[in-house]
Image (cartoon, coloured by chain):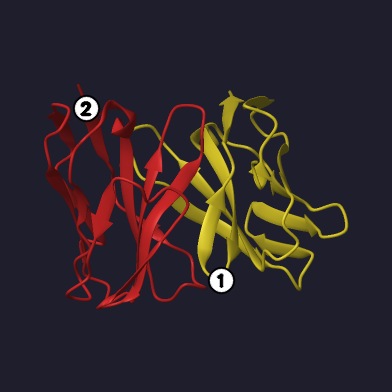
Chain colours: A red, B yellow
Amino acid sequence: NAGVTQTPKFQVLKTGQSMTLQCAQDMNHEYMSWYRQDPGMGLRLIHYSVGAGITDQGEVPNGYNVSRSTTEDFPLRLLSAAPSQTSVYFCASSYSAYNEQFFGPGTRLTVL
Amino acid sequence: DQQVKQNSPSLSVQEGRISILNCDYTNSMFDYFLWYKKYPAEGPTFLISISSIKDKNEDGRFTVFLNKSAKHLSLHIVPSQPGDSAVYFCAASQGGKLIFGQGTELSVKP
């Protein structure tokens, strides 16, 4: 049981490049979410999904896209990276929206 | 406008004593509150939670208190251990969407 896995662990991008952050869970959780954490701030919700085929926006969705084609995977896409997207990104999952969330180890992204 | 605030960026406590971490919120519609612990270069791990219909929840050395009239919750750790040294985040849930505080870094000295 691997829990929540994220790849890559580190990534450096140039402004304007695109990339996908991968997130997978093997706990059969319906609810998955993406957060970003910036220095001196708590985690902020980017997008979330309550099940396959259903996604919605969180607090800070601009510049990010998501899709949920399977229960296990919830990738986060940056279409045109900007320096303001330099952050640590965490993926999380839970049995439902009302249960505690399990977090992945994070992806540290730097946009130059 | 920050809906969940942890006003103490850091806290230092002696091993064996009580650690009290505080959190204030502004939205009375939050229905569920959680505390997470985070070590450097790792994801947050769930510690303890409390529903808005309760005022206390206990799990071993960890107790969370909720004061709805003051819109305040606190996490008590008794006794504190050096392994408790980490950043602690409180989070509030509305319809399953979590809003996090900025975190408090706890240092437990031997």
Question: Where's the C terminus of chain B, which quadrant?
Answer: top right
Q: Is residue A87 above or below residue B79?
A: above
Secondary structure state at the residue bearing disc 2: strand
Report, in whole angstroms, how far the alpha carbon at label 1 lies from the one at label 2: 33 Å
Disc 1 target residue: B95
Q: Which residue is rendered at x = 61% and y = 62% of the image? A: B49
Q: Amino acid at mark 1?
A: Gly
Disc 1: host chain: B
Residue A34 located left or right of residue B52: left
Q: Residues within 10 Å of mark 1 (few under 14, many from 20)?
A: few
The spot of residue A30 in percent (x, y) is 33, 76
Residue type, mark 2 in image: Val
Residue at (35% x, 47% y) in the render = A62
User: Dot 2 corresponds to which residue?
Assistant: A111
User: Residue B43: percent from the left, percent from the top?
Assistant: 36, 45
Q: Tell me the chain of label 2.
A: A
Quarter of the image for residue B29 reads bottom right
Q: Residue at x 31, y 43 (%)?
A: A89
Asked whether A61 or B31 is in front, the reply is A61
Dot 1 falls on a residue whose secondary structure is loop
* Residue B59 locus on image (x, y percent): 62, 61
Which residue is at the front of the view, A7 or B11?
A7
Of residues A24 and B85, which is closer to you in this image?
A: A24
Seen in the picture, residue A54 relative to A14 is either above or below; the reply is: below
A25 on left or right of A100: left
- Residue furthest right in the image: B69
Whether the residues at callouts 1 and 2 have beta carbons within 8 Å, the answer is: no
Expressed as whole percent of the image width and height from the top left, the position of residue B106 reads 59, 30
Residue at 17% over, 46% down: A79
